[in-house]
Amino acid sequence: MSDNRTTVGIGEWIGVFVLSCIPLVNIIMLLVWAFGNAKPSKKNYARATLILALIGVVLWIIGAIIAAAVGFSLADLSGGLSSLY
């Protein structure tokens, strides 16, 4: 049998997912669960979610830099922005 002190119940998971849908509250709660005194499964969920969010932000920044570089490169090839007028 599993230990009730370390088991996260269905209602508690529903609460986790509802709180994860609220902007800013989700980040605060994920940090509390990841680094606070939470149950191990909730702590691991919060840490994994924060890691995936960090990876997403890094990929978004890389994509934005690439898009800006391509945009500036295309603007230079077409004679700059002055050729639009």
Image: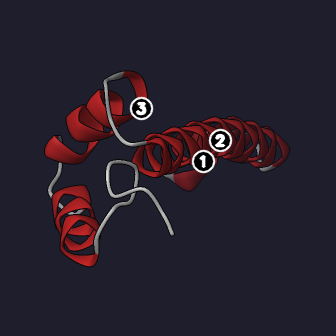
Q: Which residue is mark 3?
A: 34
Q: Nearer the viewer, residue 8 or 64?
A: 8
Q: Tell me the residue at 23%/39% (across/down).
A: 29
Helix, strand or loop under label 2: helix
Q: Tell me the residue at 64%/35% (across/down).
A: 58
Q: Which residue is mark 1?
A: 52
As drawn, 61 above or below 77: above
- As measured in the structure, the alpha-carbon distance from the residue carrying label 1 to the one carrying label 3 is 13 Å
As drawn, 13 above or below 46: below
Q: Position of residue 35 (x, y in %)?
A: 39, 22
Instruction: Find residue 77 and name its label.
Output: none
As drawn, 16 above or below 42: below
- Apparent side of residue 48 relative to residue 62 in the rendered image (left or right): left
Helix, strand or loop under label 1: helix
- Apparent side of residue 14 relative to residue 61 in the rendered image (left or right): left
Query: Quarter of the image holding residue 3?
Result: bottom left
